[in-house]
Image: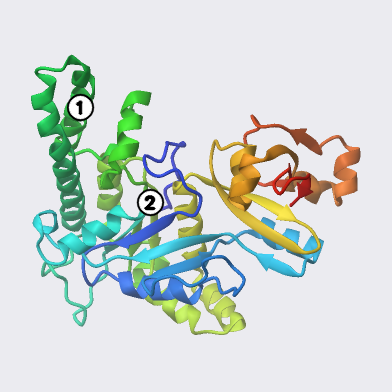
């Protein structure tokens, strides 16, 4: 089964932020904790990094980025600060979670606090690792979790809809919003996730306030045995692909083997390379992290110099003042302009001077939309005078 490519861009129907979180979700004993432990070992460690200390069940995982690495080698700064994806380990879900079964309330509160989902599905057989439902059946497991998440969203909408529907009988101004709630409920009750709907600007505005669980972008991770992963064969792969295409068509699917990733982590770099070549396979951790970042609709821009080379996250579609605000909140308020050139041009031409000579070093105002790979220099008058970052 080939990795499913990310679909065309869709808006993230949640908080407009830059440092976003993605939660690892699944039934008990599917490999969530093992995957999270692997990601934690890859955690960004930098004492000068803002908010470096976070909760034990969170990990800031460095984003694989060859462009950032090249920029560090090119500028040779005193500090090198990568971008990261913040991953959250979420308690296992069981059938009935939407009505409080198991750790349902804890699970659903934690998943409500993240911006995207790594949905881990087990298809490996192991007599020593029991399955909460008694047998390995990933399609059934997918149905359980997707149903519980939709049920919780239905409950969230109905809590707002019921009193508003009563009010709309006497107040015509409420009828438009009531109609939106009715449309959302109909969509969810038909077995579809909010993230896969085509919504009008007014509906998106309401969805941004509701922060529904099924509005969150998802990546489906298929946890296989090492033997099946290397062969890329298992009786469940085609069935899972069909389920995702039908129930969550905007979501990529990535097969992986958590036990293989654990084995690779324990090896030296040379041992790892030899093992992968012998088995004719590859690690998927970098792809998992990068795909999660992409699903959150984030792009990378960079600030570069002798002091620091740093990668910054920004949601697609944001403009230069918002990029400035990512660097420092005052920079957005006192933004003057941004000097911009792109990584691709710098790598091709070899130096900032050559980029300028070619006419590809540009000055932009407030309406410039930041592009992935932009290198920017912000000019502002925060602090009473023109300063550069």
Of residues 129 and 108, the one drawn nearer to the viewer in this rendering: 108
**Does residue 315 lie above or below 307 as drawn?**
above
Q: Nearer the viewer, residue 50 or 31?
A: 50
Residue for point 17% across, 76% down:
130
Quadrant occupied by the N terminus? bottom left
Can residue 294 be spotted in the picture? Answer: yes
Q: Residues within 10 Å of mark 1 (few under 14, many from 20)?
A: few
**Quarter of image, res 75:** bottom right
Quick check: 333 left or right of 120? right
Up/down of 348 relative to 181, above or below? below
Residue 126, horizontal then vertical, whole percent: 23, 77
Q: How is the image coloured?
A: rainbow
Q: Please identify the residue farthest to the top as the structure is shown.
A: 172
Asked whether residue 370 appears in the rendered view, the answer is no
How far separated are the C-alphas under marks 2 and 1? 23 Å
Write the residue at 60% across / 46% down.
Answer: 325
Does dot 2 land on a helix, a strand or a loop? loop
Q: Would you name the residue on which mark 1 appears?
A: 183
Q: Which residue is mark 2?
A: 115
Q: Is residue 239 left or right of residue 232?
A: left
Question: How many labels sit on residues?
Answer: 2
Q: Earlier in the sequence, mark 2 or mark 1?
A: 2
């Amino acid at each position: 089964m080939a990795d499913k490519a990310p679909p065309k861009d869709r808006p993230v129907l949640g908080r407009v932020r830059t440092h976003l979180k993605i939660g690892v979700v699944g039934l008990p004993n599917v490999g969530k904790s093992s995957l999270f432990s692997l990601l934690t070992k890859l955690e960004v460690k930098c004492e000068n990094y803002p908010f470096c200390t976070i909760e034990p069940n969170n990990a800031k995982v460095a984003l694989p980025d060859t462009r950032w690495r090249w920029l560090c080698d090119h500028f040779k700064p005193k500090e090198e600060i990568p971008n990261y994806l913040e991953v959250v380990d979420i308690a296992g879900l069981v059938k009935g979670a939407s009505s409080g079964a198991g750790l349902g309330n804890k699970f659903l509160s934690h998943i409500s606090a993240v911006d995207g989902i790594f949905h881990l599905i087990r298809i490996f057989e192991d007599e020593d690792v029991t399955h909460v439902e008694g047998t390995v059946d990933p399609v059934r497991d997918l149905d359980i979790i997707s149903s519980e998440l939709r049920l919780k969203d239905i409950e969230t909408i109905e809590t707002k809809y019921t009193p508003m529907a009563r009010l709309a009988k006497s107040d015509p101004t409420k009828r438009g919003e009531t109609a939106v709630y009715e449309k959302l409920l109909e969509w969810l009750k038909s077995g579809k996730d909010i993230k896969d709907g085509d919504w009008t600007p007014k509906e998106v505005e309401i969805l941004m306030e509701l922060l529904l669980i099924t509005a969150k972008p998802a990546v489906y991770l298929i946890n296989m045995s090492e033997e099946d992963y290397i062969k890329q064969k298992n009786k469940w792969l085609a069935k899972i692909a069909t389920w995702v295409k039908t129930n969550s068509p905007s979501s990529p699917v990535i097969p992986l083997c958590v036990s293989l990733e654990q084995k690779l982590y324990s090896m030296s770099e040379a041992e790892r390379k030899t093992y992968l070549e012998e088995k004719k396979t590859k690690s998927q951790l970098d792809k998992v992290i990068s795909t999660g970042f992409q699903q959150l609709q984030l792009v990378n821009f960079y600030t570069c110099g002798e002091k620091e080379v740093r990668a910054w996250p920004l949601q697609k579609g944001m403009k230069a003042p918002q990029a400035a605000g990512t660097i420092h909140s005052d920079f957005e308020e006192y933004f003057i302009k941004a000097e911009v050139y792109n990584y691709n041009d710098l790598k091709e031409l070899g130096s900032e001077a050559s980029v300028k000579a070619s006419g590809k070093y540009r000055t932009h105002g407030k309406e410039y939309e930041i592009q992935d790979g932009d290198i920017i220099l912000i000019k502002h008058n925060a602090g009473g005078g023109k300063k550069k970052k």
